[in-house]
Image: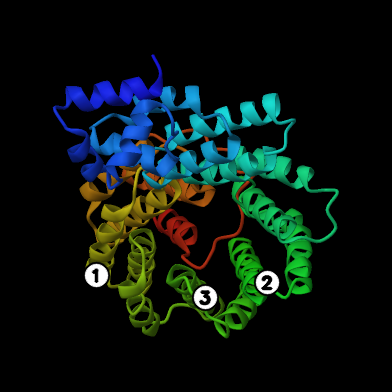
Amino acid sequence: MSLNTIVKRRRQKMGLTSTDAASKAGISKSYLLAIEAGTRIPSPSVMRQLAIALTWPDDVWYLEYLQVERRPPTLCRLAELMLEADNVKLAEAIALHALAFSQGSYNGRYNSKVYYLMEKISLKKQDFKQMLQWSQLMVNALNHVAISYRKGVALYNHALALSLAEHHNGRQCQPLLAQAKEIFLALHRPREANLVDYTKANILLANKNYKDALTLYCQVKRHPFADPVINVETHLGELICYWALHGKDKGLIQQFETLIDKATPLQTARIYHNMGVLHRQCGEFALAIEQLEKALALYGDTQTRQRGSTIAELCLTHILAGHLPEAAAYAQQYALVPDPKDTQDTASMILLAQKLGLPTPPFQTDNLVLDDYEQRLTCSFHIIASQP
């Protein structure tokens, strides 16, 4: 059965006149009648508006839509709409259909468009290994291009994917970022060049090069972004670098707090987490626990690394406060958090489990690096060392 017939039958099944259905979908009656007559193929946005008006599930109608619309750019727009609606699984399925049509009917003309979309989908899924694969395909597709905005974006995205997939491997990312910045400067795109510096600073911070990261964050702050999310991230990075270089400072707590009104929920969770760690370092355990519990309540299911860090910090803080039953509960909760988790946090939790008399799993220390500004691992060692 053709799409136009299905649309018409769906409308009739819902008991809607063509006038009512068109009004609910936000389109003209003549447009709807043309769709039902098969003389017009609805655009992705109109098709989705119509499906909402007819209470037609996305994962049902899209299969019918693919029977009449096989142009990869149009399917990419449809996948984008699904991604915006947080239907990641369907967005990925549609994007892969677009790639198949590009390769089969258009001699690969639209492959790079799909690669870019798949990078965004992989990032939304937090599947950084997959994002790295798609970004590599995108870079390869543009190898023959000397200088173009798309190539600069491709190099930048590949560096970002590599950073996320390889846990901020700065040595491999920096040459890609340098190439991207060179292209953006040659094209007179200062905003994008500043974004490259912001990403470099984040990678330096992740690799505990606090001094160079602080220099870059201060440089980036001189040219604020239109996106307040990046501005908050820049300020967060600057505060963390200062903390790492100069040690605990109660004044930092107030500076973190000033960012909350401008922050996203995930950023707010990280702010509460950092405030909690500072309170713990200053010996204010009740305030630390209060802030850390606020952070924990804001993390989503995909933020396993951040959630694990906050649970580890809560376990440590409860031990320091003498709340051993609560600490044991958080130790057990940490064990249930799926990977990926931070290596230092896992090492800290093994030490704290010993303190609590809980069983400890085997642990490889190959990837263990020096403690960071939170000093969670160091504090855990001190607790074990001070046991009678």
Residue that numbered label 1 is attached to: 287
Identify the amino acid type marked 2. Ala
In the rendered structure, which disc, 2 or 1, sits on the residue that comes first in sequence?
Answer: 2
Q: What's the residue at 37%, 58% (across, down)?
A: 266
Q: CA distance from mark 3 to mark 2?
A: 12 Å
Residue 255 shows in the view:
yes
Q: Is residue 213 left or right of residue 299?
A: right
Name above or below for residue 216 compared with residue 82. below
Name above or below for residue 47 compared with residue 368. above
Residue that numbered label 2 is attached to: 193
Residue that numbered label 3 is attached to: 225
Identify the amino acid type marked 3. Phe
Q: Position of residue 45 (x, y in %)?
A: 40, 44
Q: What's the residue at 63%, 27% (across, down)?
A: 101
Residue 185 picture quarter: bottom right
Between disc 2 and disc 1, the foreground one is 2
Q: Position of residue 31 (x, y in %)?
A: 35, 40
Q: Residues within 10 Å of mark 3 (few under 14, many from 20)?
A: some
Is the N terminus in the top left, top right, bottom left or bottom right quadrant?
A: top left
